[in-house]
Image: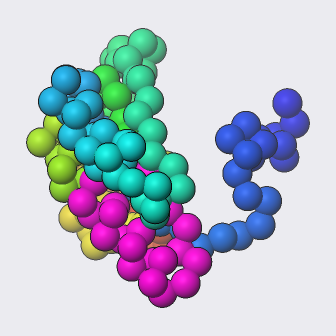
Amino acid sequence: MDHAALDRIHLEPQDPLPARESCLLLRDLTPEAVATFLDQAGPAAGVDHPLLMVEVRHMGGAMARPSPVEDAVCSRDALYFMDSVGILAAPPAAEAVEQATQRLYTAMAPYGTGHTMVNIHGTPGDEQDRARAWTPEVYDRLRHDKATYDPANLLRYGHAVTPA
C-alpha cells in the first residue's frame, strides 16, 4: 500500500477535522472492565452517544516483549488499549463529546495502567499529562536527551518533552 493511502485503512477523513481523541492502556479486560466499558460506550449509552468511535484493541505479542535495545516504548505491561474519538462539530456537540470522554475515562481508570501511547494520546495537556506516555524513568531519560540535543526547546509542539 502506498504511504499516502494509509489513512484509508480506517477510512479516516481526508481533510482536517476538529476532533477529540483519547487513549488509556488497560492492564487486563476483566468482566468488570467489560461491563463498565459497555455501560459507558455500549448500547446502554444510548443512540445519541456523542463519541464517533470507541474501541478496545488487543496488545501483547511482540509489543509485550522487551526490546533488545534501549527504547522509549512504555506500553509493554498493557494487554489492551482503549481509544475514542469524538467530532467537535459545534459548541454543544463539543461539550457533549468532552463530557462523554471524561465519563468514559474516569469509569475505566481503575482498569488502566495510568499510561497512554504517545501517538494516540489525544490532546496534549500540561507536562504531567504528556508524561503519561512513558514511565517516570523513561521520561527522565527523554528530558535529559532533550536537554542535550534540543536545549533551546525548538521541537516543542504537540506531545513535546521538556528539557531537563
Q: Nearer the viewer, residue 42 or 9?
A: 42
Q: Is residue 74 left or right of residue 135?
A: right
Residue 149: image x %, image y %?
A: 45, 59
Whether 89 is among the magenta residues is yes
Residue 82: image x %, image y %?
A: 37, 40
* Magenta-drawn segment: 83-104
Q: Residue at x 34, y 28 (%)?
A: 80
Residue 151: image x %, image y %?
A: 40, 70
> Height in image: 155 above or below 103?
below
Q: Residue at x 26, y 44 (%)?
A: 39
Q: Quadrant of residue 97?
A: bottom left
> Height in image: 134 above or below 151?
above
Quadrant in the picture for the C terminus: bottom left
Q: Is residue 164 left or right of residue 151?
A: left
Q: Is residue 10 left or right of residue 56?
A: right
Q: Nearer the viewer, residue 161 or 7?
A: 7
Secondary structure mostly seen in magenta is helix
Q: Is residue 39 visible?
A: yes
Q: Residue at x 55, y 67 (%)?
A: 87
Whether 84 is among the magenta residues is yes
Q: Quadrant of residue 8?
A: top right
> Height in image: 152 above or below 143?
below
Quadrant in the picture for the N terminus: top right
Q: Is residue 138 visible?
A: no
